[in-house]
């Protein structure tokens, strides 16, 4: 009997090569790295000029690494301008999807939206519960396609019917055109909300009809001012998030932003953790001030109480000058108090009393 023992050693050598261009070496967070967004993984790439973050209808950012646009839901994150001091490129604070990443400048001009003036269906891919009444909904697009929405702009969703009439509401995505194969909406569900209730009841795979019309295009980036004041009420934060993606995500943009958010209580704050992450990541560029109108007196809240007022705005340096623009987005009572009705060209209310002109205030 002959026993033969054969030993085979297999050595596997893996070489990982990371190239960091000169223009990205100063990035504090992740000039070149990988960041998770939903079902895909995308390369975080800081562009060398503002023109390199233009995203076309095909879904690929100019100069993007091919790995970044392969597969449904894969993203190319082009954000921070190499200056963001966050510890990680995405998934900050464990937040899902677009809420967990850095600001991403993925700009297109008006007229590029994948949805036209006729309604078209988009399937619900996933639902994430963010708070007791807030959901992050991801809807599908054709593989490799991005939403193609300009900044600032929204889309219209047909959310069933009520009393025999279609329920149509505007929504501003919190994702950007860097996300291909999908887009994300941050939706606050109201007890009697016809649209939000419809969206919250949707099963995975159900479809909602969407469209985009010229009226949905608002003021466009670049905004041309050194300072932005964002006055926000409730769900009015989502158009401001869209604007922040462009302002904070574009290399060379040094615009300073003060966002004053009015909510009833701490539990009603929409996108609070994401905004705090961005505020920490952009010291001196973004400041978020929260004002609560119905926070329990015995809570641990140490911030401002009541409503957004002249005193609060002045205390945080929100003053009229030629280099300042004010964005207002919230419920009708907020418009009436701060700047006058949304559809009125005349400026009234707190901002008029402070000395702002109608040309300095944009009503979303």
Image: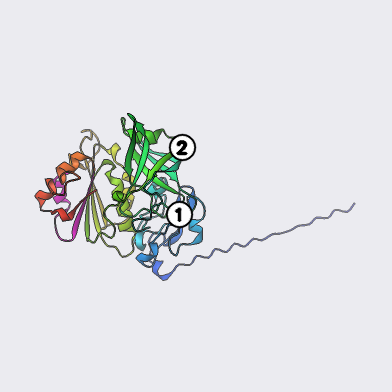
Name the residue: 20% across, 40% down: 332
Q: Is residue 305 visible?
A: no
**First in sequence: mark 1 or mark 2?**
1
Residue 252 rendering spot, x and y as whole percentages:
31, 65
- The local crowd at label 1, few if under 14, some if 14 to 19, many if 20 or more residues have their Cα within 10 Å, is many
Judging depth in this view, the residue of 268 and 67 nearest the camera is: 67
Element at label 2: loop
Q: Is 336 situated left or right of 257 in this image? A: left
Q: Position of residue 177 (x, y in %)?
A: 40, 54
Residue 129 at what x, y percent from top left? 40, 38
- Disc 1 is placed on an element classified as loop
Say whether marks 1 and 2 touch (CB < 8 Å).
no
Q: Which residue is mark 1?
A: 75
Image coordinates for residue 104, horizontal then vertical, percent: 37, 56
Residue for badge 2? 206
User: In this figure, which colouring scheme has been used for the structure?
Assistant: rainbow
């Amino acid at each position: 009997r002959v026993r033969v023992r054969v030993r085979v050693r297999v050595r596997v050598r893996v070489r990982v090569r990371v190239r960091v261009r000169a223009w990205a070496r100063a990035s504090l967070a992740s000039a070149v790295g990988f960041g998770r967004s939903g079902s895909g993984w995308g390369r975080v790439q800081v562009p060398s000029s503002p023109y390199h973050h233009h995203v076309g209808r095909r879904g690929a950012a100019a100069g993007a690494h091919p790995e970044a646009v392969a597969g449904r839901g894969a993203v190319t994150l082009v954000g921070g301008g190499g200056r963001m001091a966050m510890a990680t490129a995405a998934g900050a604070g464990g937040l899902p999807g677009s809420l967990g990443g850095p600001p991403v400048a993925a700009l297109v001009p008006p007229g590029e939206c994948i949805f036209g003036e006729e309604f078209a269906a988009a399937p619900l891919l996933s639902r994430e519960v963010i708070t007791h009444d807030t959901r992050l909904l991801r809807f599908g697009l054709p593989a490799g396609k991005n939403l193609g929405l300009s900044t600032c702009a929204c889309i219209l969703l047909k959310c069933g019917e009520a009393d025999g009439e279609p329920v149509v509401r505007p929504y501003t995505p919190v994702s950007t055109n860097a996300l291909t194969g999908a887009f994300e909406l941050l939706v606050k569900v109201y007890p009697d909300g016809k649209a939000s209730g419809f969206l919250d009841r949707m099963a995975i795979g159900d479809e909602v009809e969407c469209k985009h019309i010229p009226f949905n295009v608002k003021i466009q980036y670049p905004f041309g001012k050194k300072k932005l004041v964002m006055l926000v009420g409730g769900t009015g934060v989502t158009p401001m998030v869209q604007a922040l993606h462009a302002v904070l995500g574009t290399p060379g943009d040094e615009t300073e932003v003060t966002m004053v958010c009015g909510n009833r209580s701490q539990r009603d704050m929409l996108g609070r953790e994401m905004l705090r992450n961005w505020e920490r990541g952009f010291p001196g560029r973004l400041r978020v001030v929260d004002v609560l109108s119905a926070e329990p007196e015995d809570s641990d809240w140490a911030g401002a109480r009541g409503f957004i007022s002249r005193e609060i705005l002045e205390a945080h340096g929100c003053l009229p000058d030629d280099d300042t623009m004010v964005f207002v987005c919230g419920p009708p009572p907020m418009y009436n108090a701060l700047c006058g009705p949304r559809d009125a060209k005349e400026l009234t209310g707190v901002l008029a009393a402070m000395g702002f002109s109608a040309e300095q205030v944009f009503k979303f």
